Amino acid sequence: MTNNTVLIPRLHALIGEMASDVPKDLAREIECALKEQQFPPAQPMFFTFLDAIRRGDGEDGQPCTTQMLNAQTLASLGRSLSALTAVLDLLHAAERARVDGNTDEQIGDFHRNGLLLAARQIAHAAQTGLGDAITAVVNKPG
């Protein structure tokens, strides 16, 4: 099941959750007709996608399914998230010092870039670990 606020935002804005009861072919035709009539969607597409992500939809717009992860994967994800939080706290403090502080109170570009790269690498490691764990669960025989 896909997120109707993303696929048919104008129809969803018009009739709400009842849009999910409309057959897909008909919903697409109605959406096209509403678009041709320049009926605006309920909100900008960016916020529609952001709301869908907050409700638990994956990066492809599909609802996420429940997965069981092992203790090792959960521990690794916990460590990655703790490390990412620490790096983001440092970046936030560095940004506040850059905006509100004197030049001699700021960290340099080298260190700021290092923190950004660290945050990206930690997030990548967590995403890779999570992806590997989900793939292992999905492909598990039985």
Image (cartoon, grey):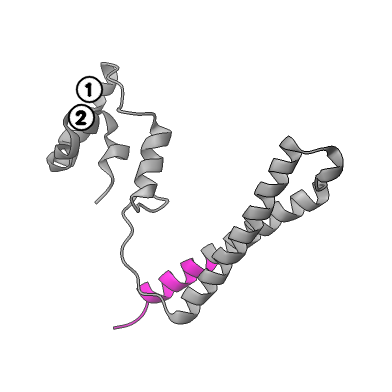
Q: Nearer the viewer, residue 1 or 118?
A: 118
Magenta span main SS: helix
Q: Going 68% across and 54% down the picture, which residue do you hit?
A: 90
| Residue 77 at x, y percent in the picture | 51, 69
- Residue 102, label in figure: none
Quick check: 74 above or below 97? below
- What amino acid is at disc 2? Glu
User: Under tag 2, what secondary structure?
Assistant: helix
| Vertical relation: 24 (above or below) 133 | above
Q: Nearer the viewer, residue 27 or 15?
A: 15
- Label 2: how many residues lie within 10 Å, few (<14), some (14-19) or many (20+)? few
**Residue sitting at 69 percent across and 59 percent down?**
118
Circle 1: residue type:
Ala
Name the residue at 21% across, 30% down. Answer: 11
Query: Magenta residues?
Result: 128-142
C-alpha distance separating marks 2 and 1 = 6 Å
- The residue singled out by tag 1 in the image is 33
- Based on the displayed image, in which of its 4 quarters is residue 67 positioned? bottom left
Closer to us: 25 or 94? 94
Q: Is residue 56 left or right of residue 74?
A: left
Count how many numbered circles sit on residues in the image: 2
- Single out the residue that lies furthest toward the top: 37
| 25 is higher (above) or lower (below) than 64 | above
Residue beneath label 2, please?
A: 29
Mark 2–mark 1 CB contact (< 8 Å): yes
Q: What kind of element bears circle 1? A: helix
Q: Is residue 54 magenta?
A: no
Q: Classify residue 76 as left or right of residue 40.
A: right
